[in-house]
Image (cartoon, rainbow, N blue to C red):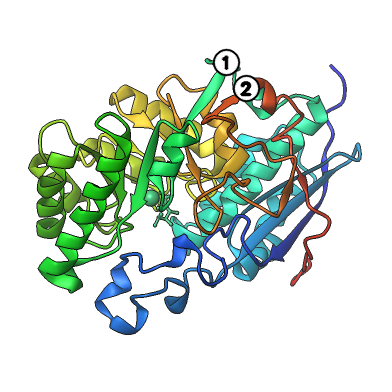
């Protein structure tokens, strides 16, 4: 067997302005236009999610160089604090290891950060390192990640679109449109009426069969979510997403009993590791889990989460994370479609999800993507050299 290259260098950089930290957008973008959040109870933070810091972290870029000269990289949400964790803590588990030691590296990164990690920023960081390791292995073996994961189970991916204009998404060939919810409980009955009016208008524009969903971004309480779901039934809402706090497993289990028969409850984009998703699945919290591969623990962990979900009969529709979710969804029987986040400010054109950070980032055409679009080594993308990398720490 030919010698397996070893890892020589690990470098962590940061980037600002869109990309993996896709909420980091300029004024006037739909993604920051009066979207309901847990902070909406404070009027000063109701209009803009940037006002309370949704974009405070920025993008983490992890770059891993092997002894044969191959370089793998990945991007995720994490910025400078994540770069510190990579350089000062996690790099020691990679440098000197073989490029194939992905499973052992993951466990050492997870166990060594248990005392301050487990979810959130630290698991985002571990995810970024893990994705870069899979990209590196693909570069060394000259294979796309979907082949490393056992191969595609379908010839093309189909996408629903998240954004302010499901009516335009329908015209672009997407299979559904997920609306951001604009009003939370702090805006009372008038806000609830406005939410349902928006849904009503969209249903009239798209007709009876196009999927329409609400993304509630953790902003609701159980009673409000229940009444929203009941009110949305007449407009054929397909699912109500992330209505409650990610920690409220009990609330999700109750909501799933409360919603009208046939309406789906989904969540998971801010959940992490197989243990967090075990709680969601075993407590009957949702019909679809939506892990973000850049936030849940990376591909190595998402493989475990997906198998757990499969045993529970739950679908795994990863939260939109560009090529990192496309390669995964391509290979999973219980991931029949994928999310595409409309990053154009008016949600009126298809732009690469992590624009402008990744060169060669594929986009859906007519709401679909041939798997052959992904047939390049690793995740098949390169860092845009015009993006100014900053390396805040070294080791
Ligand atoms: C549209 C939502 O408010 C979030 O911005 C979005 O990133 C996420 O919740 C999603 O499911 O795409
Ligand atoms: Mg969501």
Quadrant in the picture for residue 224: bottom left
Tell me the quarter of the image containing the C terminus.
bottom right
- Would you say 336 lies left or right of 61 here? left
Give x and y (percent) for residue 322: 59, 42
Which residue is at 71% across, 37% downward?
Answer: 135
Which residue is at 64% across, 70% downward?
Answer: 80
Q: If you read the primary sequence from the N terminus, does the residue marked by circle 1 or circle 2 appear first?
A: 1
Which residue is at 79% across, 25% downward?
Answer: 141
The extreme front residue here reads 205
Tell me the quarter of the image containing the N terminus.
top right
Give 110 or 371, whichever is nearer the viewer.
371
Quadrant in the picture for residue 19: bottom right
Which residue is at 50% across, 38% downward?
Answer: 301
> Could you say whether the residue bearing mark 1 is in a helix, strand or loop?
loop
- Would you say 346 lies left or right of 181 here? right
Residue 155 bears which disc, if any? 1
| Neighbour tally class for label 1: few under 14, some 14-19, many 20 plus, Cα within 10 Å | few
Give x and y (percent) for residue 325: 54, 37
Give x and y (percent) for residue 83: 67, 64
| Neighbour tally class for label 2: few under 14, some 14-19, many 20 plus, Cα within 10 Å | some
Q: Quickly name the residue at label 2.
A: 371
Give x and y (percent) for residue 379: 69, 35
Give 213 or 345, whichever is nearer the viewer.
345
- Would you say 130 lies left or right of 297 here? right
Q: Are marks 1 and 2 in contact (CB under 8 Å)?
A: yes
> Could you say whether the residue bearing mark 2 is in a helix, strand or loop?
helix
């Amino acid at each position: 067997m030919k010698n397996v290259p070893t890892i020589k260098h690990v470098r962590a950089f940061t980037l600002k302005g869109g990309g993996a930290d896709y909420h980091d957008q300029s004024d006037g973008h739909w993604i920051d236009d009066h979207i309901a959040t847990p902070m909406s109870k404070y009027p000063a933070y109701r209009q803009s999610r940037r006002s309370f810091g949704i974009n405070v972290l920025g993008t983490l870029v992890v770059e891993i160089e092997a002894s044969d000269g191959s370089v793998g990289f990945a991007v995720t949400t994490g910025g400078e604090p994540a770069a510190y964790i990579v350089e000062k803590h996690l790099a020691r588990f990679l440098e000197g290891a073989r490029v194939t030691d992905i499973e052992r590296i993951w466990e050492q990164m997870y166990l060594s950060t248990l005392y301050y990690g487990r979810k959130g920023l630290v698991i985002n960081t571990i995810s970024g390192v893990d994705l870069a390791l899979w990209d590196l292995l693909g570069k060394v073996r000259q294979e796309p990640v979907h082949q490393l994961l056992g191969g595609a189970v379908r010839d093309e991916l189909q996408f629903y679109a998240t954004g302010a204009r499901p009516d335009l998404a329908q015209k672009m060939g997407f299979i559904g449109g997920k609306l951001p919810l604009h009003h939370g409980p702090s805006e009372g009955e008038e806000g609830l009426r406005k939410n349902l009016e928006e849904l009503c208008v969209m249903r009239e524009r798209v007709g009876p069969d196009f999927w329409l969903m609400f993304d509630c971004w953790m902003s609701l309480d159980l009673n409000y979510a229940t009444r929203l779901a009941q009110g949305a039934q007449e407009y054929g809402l397909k699912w109500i997403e992330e209505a409650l706090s990610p920690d409220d497993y009990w609330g999700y289990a109750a909501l799933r009993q409360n919603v009208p028969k046939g309406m789906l409850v989904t969540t998971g984009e801010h959940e992490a590791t197989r243990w967090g998703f075990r709680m969601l699945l075993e407590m009957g919290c949702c019909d679809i889990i939506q892990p973000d591969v850049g936030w849940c623990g990376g591909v190595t962990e998402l493989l475990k989460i997906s198998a757990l979900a499969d045993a529970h009969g739950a679908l795994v529709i990863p939260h939109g994370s560009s090529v990192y979710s496309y390669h995964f969804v391509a290979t999973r029987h219980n991931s029949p479609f994928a999310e595409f986040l409309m990053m154009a400010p008016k949600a009126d054109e298809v732009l690469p999800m992590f624009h402008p950070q990744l060169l060669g980032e594929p986009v859906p055409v007519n709401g679909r993507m041939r798997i052959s679009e992904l047939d390049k080594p690793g995740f098949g993308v390169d860092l845009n050299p015009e993006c100014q990398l900053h390396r805040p720490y070294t080791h």
